[in-house]
Amino acid sequence: MDSKTLEKIKVYVKKVSDLSDDKRHDFGHAERVTRNAMWILDTLKIGESVDRNLLQAACYLHDVVVMKRDSRNYFSRFVSHFFEKNLNKKYLGKVLADFDLPWEEDQIIAEAIINHPNSIPFLVLNKEKDIYSKILQDADSLDYASSEREVSFGRGKGIIQIYIARKYLSWIRNHMERYLNFPELNK
């Protein structure tokens, strides 16, 4: 993927996230997932086998379908969380069509985004999937349990909800290797 297309994707995701009220899937989350993916490539020394721009595009776009959904009420967030894979299958093609990507790039991005959800808390991993799906899922899982993302779990919540979220994320962090395609990434 060329840098111009990647930049166009970043601008698009920024616009969508600015219009969204979803505090957990904001542009900062997309950027952290992208940084995590680049760190994974470098840590595992597999950068030669992956198109970095294509992986970054998948990282930026991975939650765009969720960002575009109305997440103001609990039911909508619940539906998005449990049915994210199905929502991506249904709506992602319309998003990707705007970028006029070559068929191969379109397929790689779509496959990675469709496969990325459900490692946390459901332990649905991509061990047998392509490298882009594995890296995107792990990059997203690492951010899910990050201290930066923990802040988003507490925004607008009461003290009891914040306490429960912190305990839950602490448990996830202590068992992170269970939620990774590459458990060796857990520090």
Image: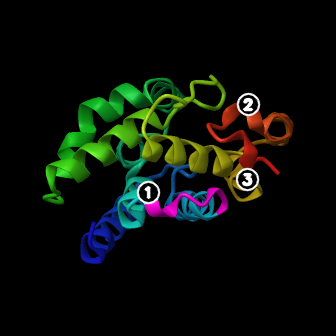
Q: Going 73% across and 53% down the picture, which residue do you hit?
A: 146
**Quarter-of-image position of residue 114:** top left
Q: Position of residue 36 (x, y in %)?
A: 61, 59
The way the protein has been coloured in the rendering is: rainbow
Q: Which mark is residue 146?
A: 3
Question: In the image, is 129 to the left or to the right of 99?
Answer: right
Extent of the magenta region: 43-48
The mark nearer the N terminus, 3 or 1, is 1
In this view, the residue in front, 126 or 9, is: 126
Front residue (pair 34, 168) = 34
Q: Are marks 3 and 2 in contact (CB under 8 Å)?
A: no
**Would residue 62 be counted in the magenta stretch?**
no
- Mark 2 residue type: Arg
Q: Which residue is mark 2?
A: 178
Check disc 1 and report its element: helix, strand or loop: helix
Query: Which of the two labelled residues, at mark 3 and mark 2, occupies the earlier sequence position?
Result: 3
Q: Residues within 10 Å of mark 3 (few under 14, many from 20)?
A: some
Taking the image as shown, residue 16 lies to the left or right of residue 122, namely: left
Residue name at image x 68 percent, y 33 percent: 179
For label 2, the SS is: helix
